[in-house]
Amino acid sequence: MKKSSNSVRIGLAVTVILGTIGWLAFTSYGANKSYYVTVPELVKMGDKAYTSNLRVEGFVEPGSIQTEGPHVTFVLNEFESHNASAPKGRKLTVVYKGQEPPPDTFKDDAQALAMGTIGRDGVFHATALQAKCASKYAPAQPGGKPGMTPEKQAKPAAGNSQASVAPAEAAGKETAGAAN
């Protein structure tokens, strides 16, 4: 008899523990889920936007950044300012009140990602910010590396004798050597 009562107690304890773990996992899953949206997609979400954790992506409107210590207020636009559609683009006011100041790459026209919630007042309340540096993601100039200025591309490396060889000549030498 004693063995069966201990087995029941152990089984009951295991059931309670597993049930608690399952309940915690289920309830925390929904709380930690966040949607990645652009500014126009946020507008289309309707009432669901007010009850969701969101990550909103856009471009920082030039001249809109107002800092006060680690807190920042700015406007996200769906387009970069040099885009012809920028004046007609949807905009979103963002208030960031995080523990850390915004990243160094956070500046006018930077692509930014704000994480937080949107209030009924139409203001996005961010708790975290990420920004990309526009110059690092610029398209490559012909014959250069991404983000390089034309002055840096024009000068061949010192002591590099192959830098003066035309690309067609260099390609011909490589294929001739491979045929031997």
Image (cartoon, rainbow, N blue to C red):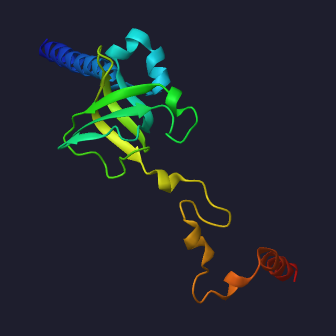
Judge whether 120 appears above or below 126 on screen. above
Q: Residue 144's spot in the image, x, y percent?
A: 62, 66
- Which residue is at the front of the view, 64 or 113? 64
Judge whether 7 appears above or below 57 on screen. above
Q: Quadrant of residue 50?
A: top left
Most extreme residue toward the left is 2
Residue drawn at x 21%, y 44% as measured from the top left: 100
Compared across the picture, whether 173 is left or right of 163 comes to right
Compared across the picture, whether 87 is left or right of 54 comes to right
- Which residue is at the front of the view, 11 or 48? 48
Q: Quadrant of residue 164?
A: bottom right
Q: Where the C terminus falls, by quadrant?
A: bottom right
Residue drawn at x 33%, y 18% as measured from the top left: 122
Compared across the picture, whether 120 is left or right of 134 comes to left
Q: Residue 142's spot in the image, x, y percent?
A: 68, 63
Q: Residue 132's spot in the image, x, y percent?
A: 43, 47
Q: Residue 175's spot in the image, x, y percent?
A: 84, 76
- Which residue is at the front of the view, 43 or 162? 43
How many circles with numbers are drawn on the protein? 0
Residue drawn at x 62%, y 86% as measured from the top left: 160
Q: Where the N terminus falls, by quadrant?
A: top left
